[in-house]
């Protein structure tokens, strides 16, 4: 196991290229289970999570290889219907093989994904949607056992307590592509990653209307064919580098992001006095000397992303005045507060709210990464801080940020790894 060392409070400058979206790549890779024909997926980031999905596809009977940033998935015989605990437990996104397996084989046995440090994330909406399509579902020894003689189109509402579910939408959507008749998914997630999945399914021959909206209408087809497809840029990685530039007051050129996917972040930065400029597919920031405190509430897309909450909090720690974050997607997603305290941040939690009193400076300290996005927030804090920061359990970062060390060093940061 390794830790990441950051010597902070250094000027950063240069250009960083945004990788393909992890959260788009995972369900699209799972969707290749819907066809026997080859699929070629380009701009796939090299991450722990995408490697796990490749292993899962192989365990289910596919030939799946990554060359550069291109994944090729082919059939090499009959599919298996069992997704084992050893793989699904390491990455919640693995659960999205349930819908494709059920549609293709009419049966699936998929391990429940288990707990998560950012709070309870049940699978009830997944099961509700698949049950509405005519699936018999049982829970046996920690596995979802799903069977259906024939999936049939229906109308299903997928709104939950904290809004629409991205993975539940993906699972029901993929299953519906091969169901008999028409399926209407109300309160579907409309994140860019779901939109990208819809376009991939259409490239395979699926019939989907309402792409990009909260109402998806799927007309089932008898079979899907192979396709070539490009993954969208990772909006969370782009947002992380934008916040890194804002927090360190750096002139960084962020290349290749989809600016239209970042409006909620751009709006909040504008309120703080930071102007985000997009020109020729390159994003840069114009900083004011004194930042203004703001209130941020996380919501499903197009609201402010919960996956940028920790990174935004790091910026708030050195913003004069009182800022407030309200977490509406995962109300317990505040484990990083204790680690920011170790660096001198002044943060008080009250239920689903974090109240941040800006301080003049953070100081480097040993901190513990708890999840992927909290880890990114600690990296930003470490780059701002005076002195040396040690981020333990840095393997979390490798789940979602491609070549993070190299990209940061390319901007002039002093970062390196050491054995624990």
Image: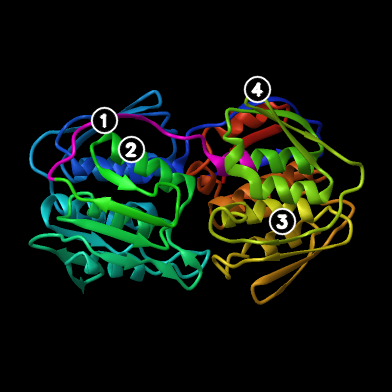
Residue denoted by label 3: 313
- Magenta range is 222-239
Q: Determine which quarter of the picture holds residue 286.
A: top right
Residue 202 placed where, x, y %?
Answer: 29, 38
Residue denoted by label 4: 280
Whether residues under marks 1 and 2 lie with C-beta atoms below 8 angstroms apart, the answer is: yes
Q: Left or right: 25 with respect to 275?
A: left
Mark positioned earlier in the residue sequence (4 or 2): 2
How far apart in space, not on screen, are marks 4 and 1 (Cα)? 30 Å
Mark positioned earlier in the residue sequence (4 or 1): 1
Residue 352 placed where, x, y %?
Answer: 64, 73
Residue denoted by label 2: 200
Residue at horizontal 70 percent and vertical 45 percent from the top: 266
> Considering depth in this image, is 338 or 289 the residue closer to the camera?
289
Residue denoted by label 1: 227
Q: Left or right: 35 with respect to 279?
A: left
Mark positioned earlier in the residue sequence (2 or 3): 2
Disc number lying in front (1 or 3): 1
Residue 319 placed where, x, y %?
Answer: 84, 53
């Amino acid at each position: 196991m390794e830790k990441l060392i950051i010597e902070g409070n250094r000027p950063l400058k240069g250009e960083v290229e945004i990788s393909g979206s992890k959260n788009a790549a995972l369900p699209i890779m799972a969707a290749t289970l819907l066809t026997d024909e080859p699929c070629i997926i380009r701009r796939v980031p090299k991450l722990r999570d995408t490697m796990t999905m490749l292993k899962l596809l192989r365990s289910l009977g596919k030939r799946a290889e990554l060359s550069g940033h291109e994944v090729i998935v082919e059939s090499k015989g009959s599919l298996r219907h069992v997704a084992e605990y050893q793989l699904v437990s390491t990455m919640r996104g693995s659960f999205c093989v349930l819908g494709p397996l059920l549609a293709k084989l009419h049966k699936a046995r998929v391990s429940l994904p288990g707990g998560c440090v950012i709070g309870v994330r049940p699978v009830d909406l997944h099961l509700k949607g698949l049950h509405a399509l005519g699936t018999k579902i049982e829970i046996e020894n920690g596995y979802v056992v799903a069977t259906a003689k024939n999936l049939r189109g229906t109308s299903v509402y997928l709104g939950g307590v904290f809004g629409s579910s991205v993975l539940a939408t993906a699972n029901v959507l993929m299953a519906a592509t091969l169901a008999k008749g028409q399926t209407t998914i109300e309160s579907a997630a409309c994140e860019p990653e779901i939109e990208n999945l819809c376009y991939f399914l259409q490239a395979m021959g699926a019939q989907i209307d309402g792409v990009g909206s909260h109402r998806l209408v799927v007309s089932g087809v008898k079979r899907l064919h192979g396709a070539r497809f490009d993954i969208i840029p990772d909006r969370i990685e782009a947002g992380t580098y934008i916040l890194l530039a804002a927090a360190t007051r750096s002139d960084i050129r962020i290349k290749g992001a989809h600016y239209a996917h970042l409006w909620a972040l751009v709006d909040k930065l504008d309120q703080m006095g930071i102007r985000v400029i997009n020109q020729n597919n390159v994003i840069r920031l114009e900083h004011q000397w004194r930042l203004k405190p703001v209130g941020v509430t996380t919501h499903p897309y197009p609201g402010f992303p919960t996956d940028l909450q920790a990174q935004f909090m790091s910026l708030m720690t050195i913003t004069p005045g009182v800022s407030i974050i309200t977490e509406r997607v995962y109300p317990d997603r505040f484990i990083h507060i204790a680690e920011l305290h170790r660096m001198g941040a002044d943060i008080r939690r009250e239920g689903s709210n974090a109240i941040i009193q800006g301080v003049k400076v953070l100081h480097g300290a040993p901190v513990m990464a708890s999840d992927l996005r909290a880890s990114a927030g600690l990296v930003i804090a470490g780059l701002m801080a005076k002195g040396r920061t040690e981020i333990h359990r840095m393997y979390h970062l490798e789940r979602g940020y491609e070549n993070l060390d190299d990209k940061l060093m390319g901007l002039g940061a002093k970062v390196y790894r050491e054995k624990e």
